[in-house]
Image (cartoon, grey):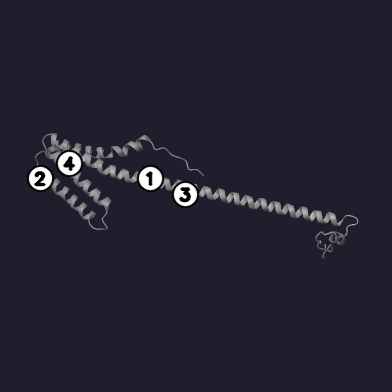
Amino acid sequence: MNEPILAPSSLAVVLPKLAPAIATSTVLILGRIWNANGAEHSVGNATLMVVLATGAAAAGAFASAGRSGDGVLAGTCFAASGGLALAGVAGYADGWSLPLLLWALATAVAYGLAARHWRTDRRDTVAYERQTTERRETHAHTERVEALRAGAQIEVAREGAAYATALAQALTARATLPGFDPVELTRAGLPELPAIDNTKEH
């Protein structure tokens, strides 16, 4: 059976492309709100954000270390570290120049990492679709061959049954003809017919 093809909605296609910009813009907006509420030139708040960003970066480094490193956890930690650094700068700075510069840089880095992930997903999707198509074509070819083979076997069996029935009817009809003598047929060069036993067991 053919599976229905579901077309993705436009929102489902566009939203992942906008996610990095939405994330960095949200951090920038929250940082500026924090700036307006007393974080501007606050050394304590800046120190807190530096400590948090450094801790998140260190956690990402430990998560990615070794052969058994978790890439997803490391990426999450590094993203959190960058977000905390952007929020700290946006909260501490008194103007928009530096926060906007860092926002543009963070957005570019986020899109670079996301583009790599999107390429990997697209490659895996294409490979999966190709394997699925090849598997379906193989199964369809096998089903066609088996259907042809079964049809041929059924036809041979049907022809064999019809031939056996016709032969039995011919033998029966010939045996009932007046003057039928199997010995004379044998003398004429025809193959000897097997004796027909008409006795029935009761």
Q: What's under tag 1, amino acid-wise?
A: Thr
Per the image, label 1 sits on a secondary structure element best described as: helix
Decide which of tag 1 and tag 2 comes sooner along the chain: 2
- In the picture, residue 32 is in which quadrant? top left
Which of the two marks, 2 or 4, is nearer to us in this view? Answer: 4
Residue 176 appears at what percent x and percent y? Answer: 87, 56
Residues 63 and 112: in front is 112
Per the image, label 3 sits on a secondary structure element best described as: helix
Residues 78 and 65: in front is 65
Residue 148 appears at what percent x and percent y? Answer: 60, 49
Q: Which residue is mark 2?
A: 44
Q: Is residue 49 above or below residue 202?
A: above
Q: Which residue is mark 3?
A: 135
Decide which of tag 1 and tag 3 comes sooner along the chain: 1
Which of the two marks, 1 or 3, is nearer to us in this view? Answer: 3
106 vs 201, left or right, is: left
